Amino acid sequence: MKTITIGKIGKRIMATKTKVGKMLARPAPPLFGRRVLFVCQCNLNRSPTFERYFAKEHPGYEFRSAGISYGYPYQFDQDIINWAQIIFFMELKQLDTVMKNPKYKFHQPIFALNIEDIYDPDDPELIKLIKQKEGWIVEQIKRIGG
């Protein structure tokens, strides 16, 4: 079994070589037991900023981000839902959209952060807002155990 890193955020996967030499990939087991997903519309501004900030400030957890709109990188799908132990949506309307879709099956706590789509990536005002919500978010993450 071999662990390799791919993608923008260094997504870890495990690959197993089959008898015919093909590599089969599957998500790697968690590094630290708490897997956190941030979701916004396109995964261009808000959720990647949250992912980077929390990965830097809380290295004991795994963070990823995704978008619910089609055609953008790091798409929200059932695989990333299954990976996550807790999910934070940037807006309630995004949460409502995915909850109405019967193809998604959730098993974890889900929250809406009420962060409007008015920020650029790593916008100082967005970072300030993240810092204001950080304590509450970390409290929710700790509640899931690990």
Image (tube, rainbow, N blue to C red):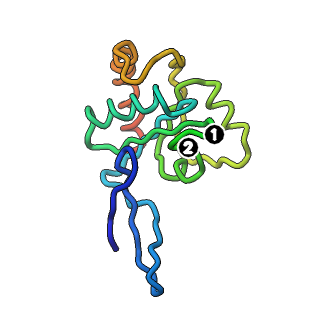
Secondary structure of the residue carrying tag 2 is loop
Q: Residues within 10 Å of mark 2 (few under 14, many from 20)?
A: some
Residue ID for mark 1: 70
Secondary structure of the residue carrying tag 1 is loop
Q: Position of residue 62 (x, y in %)?
A: 35, 45
Tell me what residue is drawn at x 46 percent, y 31 percent.
47
Label 2 or label 1, whichever comes before in sequence order: 1
39 lies above or below 106: above
Q: Residue furthest front?
A: 71
Distance CA(mark 2)–CA(mark 1): 7 Å
Tell me what residue is drawn at x 38 percent, y 12 percent.
125
Query: Would residue 59 appear left or right of 117 to someone viewing this image?
Result: left
Q: Are marks 2 and 1 in contact (CB under 8 Å)?
A: yes
The kind of residue on which mark 2 rests is: Gln
For residue 30, which quarter of the picture?
bottom left
Q: Position of residue 130 (x, y in %)?
A: 38, 21
The kind of residue on which mark 1 rests is: Tyr
Tell me what residue is drawn at x 55 percent, y 53 percent.
79
Q: Position of residue 31 (x, y in %)?
A: 31, 54
Tell me what residue is drawn at x 38 percent, y 35 percent.
51
Q: Position of residue 45 (x, y in %)?
A: 46, 26
